[in-house]
Image (cartoon, rainbow, N blue to C red):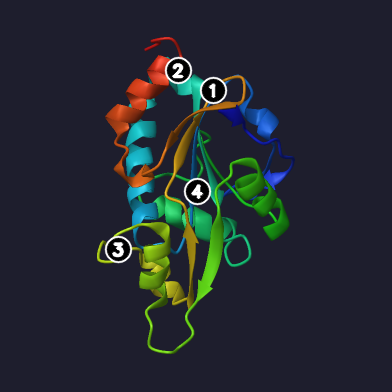
Amino acid sequence: MFDAPHYQQLINQNGVRVSSDAFRGKVQVVTFLFPYCNTYCPVVATHLVGFANMLAGTPLAGRVEVVAFDVDPGGTGPRQMRAFLHEYGWNPDRPDWQYLTGTPAQIRRVVTQGYHVDYQKVVDSGSGDDAPSAALAVAGSDPQAIVANPLADQAHVDYDITHEDVMMLVDAQGRVRRIYDQADAVGKMRLLADVRALLGGAR
């Protein structure tokens, strides 16, 4: 495993500056989301909303944080990130989910250099090829598995962001302890069991 990256002054879905120091002593469930995605990102978000809601009111609530990174920092920002979280059942004002963005250079450093997760922009060339389908093939998802995303429907962007479908658990000391290669397949009960194991069986 490896150390999670340190960063200063990224911006969350509410426009508030956040640094990695804010998560010191907490377990982080780390994921990587594209607000205009209509394949696995909405599925990941839905699972994580269920997970976070399940923690609410339990002793684990203050010890676990969901941290997502926007892999489209050049095309989206806090407004789109808030809308994305809201449409999959999350109140963006709740403090236990931080959806973070920054300049393209900042996000590239944290996501690719820090977490070793690659992403790239794929633009529709207008040649008749379906850019999102091509992108999904790169990302390893089923191009037929389309999930409704009203935000994407409204935006009508001519590009997709391909990225690895991964999720990570970071322990309270800032070490990446588990990597899930298919984030969209990780249900809330499995995630809860793994978090409890990481916390020594705490409930």
Nearer the N terminus, badge 3 or badge 1?
A: 3
Question: Vertically, is 120 above or below 164?
Answer: below
Q: Are marks 4 and 2 in contact (CB under 8 Å)?
A: no
Percent of width and height locating residue 120: 55, 63
Seen from this angle, which residue lies furthest right?
Answer: 8
Say which residue appears at 68% left-offset and 46% top-offset. Answer: 10
Nearer the N terminus, badge 1 or badge 2?
A: 1
Q: Which mark is residue 148?
A: 3
- How far separated are the C-alphas under marks 3 and 2? 34 Å
Question: Vertically, is 38 above or below 19?
Answer: below
- How far separated are the C-alphas under marks 1 and 4? 18 Å
Percent of width and height locating residue 41: 39, 53
Q: Which residue is mark 2?
A: 198
Nearer the N terminus, badge 3 or badge 2?
A: 3
Q: Residues within 10 Å of mark 2 (few under 14, many from 20)?
A: some
Percent of width and height locating residue 74: 63, 65
Q: Residues within 10 Å of mark 4 (few under 14, many from 20)?
A: many
Say which residue appears at 68% left-offset and 59% top-offset. Answer: 104
Identify the element where label 2 is drawn: helix
Q: Amino acid at mark 1?
A: Asp
Q: Are marks 1 and 2 in contact (CB under 8 Å)?
A: yes
Q: Amino acid at mark 3?
A: Ala
109, 146: nearer the viewer = 109
User: Which quarter of the figure has residue 73?
Assistant: bottom right
How many numbered marks, from 0 up? 4
Q: Which mark is residue 171?
A: 1
Identify the element where label 3 is drawn: loop
72, 114: nearer the viewer = 114
